[in-house]
Image (cartoon, grey):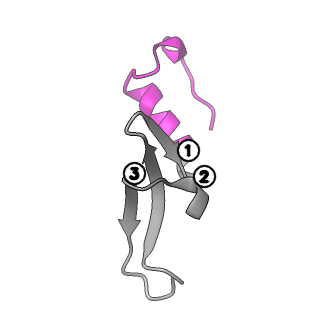
């Protein structure tokens, strides 16, 4: 993960109290140069896109009657 961040970049992470996990925190997103957000957790991408479509954030994907996941 050393190449995925720069000094001063903001890291978005989540914590878990699950004792079976190897690490208690999961790195989700890094903000590069405060202009770009880079998804680190690839399992989160589909969930974020679905939420963005449902909230109307992605205007090009509005107007469809169904969403397949």
Q: Quadrant of the C terminus?
A: top right
- The image quarter containing residue 11 is bottom left
Rendered position, 48 above or below 7 = above
At label 1, counting other C-alpha atoms closer than 10 Å, the crowd grade (few under 14, some 14-19, many 20 or more) is few
- Residue at 53% of width from left, 47% of height from top? 39
- The image quarter containing residue 15 is bottom left
Q: To which residue does mark 3 refer?
A: 9
Q: Is residue 40 left or right of residue 18?
A: right
Q: Earlier in the sequence, mark 3 or mark 1?
A: 3
- Alpha-carbon span between mark 3 and mark 1: 20 Å
Decide which of 32, 61 is in the foreground and name it: 32
Specify start and end residues of the magenta stretch as a single range. Answer: 46-69
Task: Verify CB contact (< 8 Å) between mark 3 and mark 1.
Answer: no
Q: Nearer the viewer, mark 3 or mark 2?
A: 3
Q: To which residue does mark 1 refer?
A: 45
Q: Find out whether residue 19 is within the magenta segment.
A: no
Q: Earlier in the sequence, mark 3 or mark 2?
A: 3
Mark 2, secondary structure of its residue? helix
- Alpha-carbon span between mark 3 and mark 2: 19 Å
**Residue 54 image offset from top left, x and y in percent:** 42, 28
- The image quarter containing residue 67 is top right
Q: To which residue does mark 2 refer?
A: 42
């Amino acid at each position: 993960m050393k190449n995925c961040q720069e000094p001063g970049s903001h890291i978005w992470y989540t914590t878990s109290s699950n004792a079976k996990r190897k690490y208690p925190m999961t790195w989700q997103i890094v903000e590069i140069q405060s202009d770009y957000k880079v998804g680190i957790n690839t399992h989160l991408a589909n969930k974020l896109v679905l939420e963005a479509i449902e909230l109307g954030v992605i205007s090009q994907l509005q107007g469809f009657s169904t969403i397949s996941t």
